[in-house]
Amino acid sequence: MTLTERLTLYEKLMRLDKPIGILLLLWPTLWGQWLASNGQPHWLILWIFVIGVVLMRSAGCVINDYADRDFDPHVARTRERPLAAGKVSPKEALLLAAGLSLLAFLLILPLNALVLKLSVVALFLAASYPFTKRFFAIPQAYLGIAFGFGIPMSYAALWNTIPAEAWVLLAANVFWAIAYDTQYAMVDREDDLKIGIKTSAITFGRFDLVAIAICYAAALGLIAWVGLQRGLGAAFHGGLAVAAGIALYHLWLIRARDPKQCFRAFLHNAWFGAAVFGGIALDYLLRGL
C-alpha cells in the first residue's frame, strides 16, 4: 500500500471527508467564544479552539471506530470503515488517536491552568463516549456533553472561571445533541437492535418524534434564557426563530421515519447551530455599529 493510500485511509478514519461532525462541535464552541467575549473574540484563543475542535473530533472518530470495530462490520452504513474492513489495524488507530490528542494538548499550552485541567476532562469524555453505547439508555446525552465541552472551556480561557450561563449553554447543547443524534440513530435502529447497542432511537421507541421535538424545544429555551440574561436583542431572537423553523423542518423530514430522510435531517443540523451562532454574532455586531 502506497503512502497516499495509507493517508487516505487515515483521512477516512478521522472522518475528514465528512465535516458534519466538525460543524456540530464547532458551533457550540463558537456560541461560547462569542458570548464569553461579548462579541469580541480573542483571535488567538479563537483559532486555538477551532483547530482543537478539528483535532479532537478526529481523535474521537478514531476512538469510536476502535471501540466499535467488532460491531461496525454488522451495520450496513459502517461496514466499509477502514477499521471495520480490516484496512487499518487497531494498533494504528490507537497511535493515530494518541497523536491527535497530543497535538490538541500542545495547542492549548499557552492558555491558563483551568483550561488545561478541563482538557483532561474533555479527553476523557471523547475517549469514553463510544463505550457508553454498551450500557447507557441514552448515550446521546453523554455525546452532548462531549461535543459541547468547548463551551465551558471557552469561558475558562477568557474568564478564568466558569459562570452558570456556561453550564446552561452546555445543557442546551446536550438537548440539541439528543435531538440530532437520535435522528442519526434512527438510520441504524434495525441493525443496532440486532447487535445489542443502546441508542436513544431504541430507548424512545414509538415516542421518538415527540422526544426529538421536546429536546429541540428545551435547547432553544435554554439558549433563549442565556440571551435574556445577557440582554441580547432582536437579531439574537431572530436567529433562534430561524433555528426553530429548521427544527420544525427536521421533524417534517423524519415524520415517516425513513432512514434516508432521518440521515438528511441529521446532516441539516449544521444549519441549526449556524442559525443560533448567526443570531448571537449579528446581535453583537449591530451593537458595535
Image: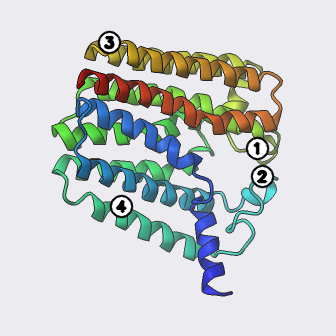
User: Residue at (72%, 73%) from the top-left corner?
Assistant: 86
Task: Looking at the image, tell me whether mark 2 or mark 4 is earlier in sequence order.
Answer: 2
What amino acid is at disc 1?
A: Asp
Q: Are marks 4 and 1 in contact (CB under 8 Å)?
A: no
What secondary structure is marked by label 4? helix
Residue under label 2: 77
Location of residue 167 in the rendering, given as x and y in whole percent from the top left corner: 33, 28
The answer to whether one can see residue 137 in this image is no
What amino acid is at disc 2?
A: Arg
Residue 104 shows which numbered tag?
A: 4
Q: Are marks 3 and 1 in contact (CB under 8 Å)?
A: no
Q: Determine whether 210 is above or below 107 in the image.
A: above
Residues at marks 3 and 1, CA–CA distance in whole angstroms: 41 Å
What amino acid is at disc 4?
A: Ala
Q: Determine whether 66 is above or below 152 in the image.
A: below
Residue under label 3: 228
Residues at marks 4 and 3, CA–CA distance in whole angstroms: 34 Å
Residue under label 1: 192
What secondary structure is marked by label 2? loop
Q: Nearer the viewer, mark 1 or mark 2?
A: 2
Task: Looking at the image, tell me whether mark 4 or mark 3 is earlier in sequence order.
Answer: 4
User: Residue at (40%, 63%) from the top-left corner?
Assistant: 101
Residues at marks 3 and 2, CA–CA distance in whole angstroms: 42 Å
Location of residue 116 in the rendering, given as x and y in whole percent from the top left corner: 24, 53
What secondary structure is marked by label 3? helix
Instruction: Please give left or right for residue 60 compared with residue 43 in the image.
Output: right
Residues at marks 1 and 2, CA–CA distance in whole angstroms: 11 Å
What amino acid is at disc 3?
A: Leu
Q: Determine whether 267 is above or below 12 in the image.
A: above
Residue 129 shows which numbered tag?
A: none
Q: Determine whether 159 is above or below 128 in the image.
A: above
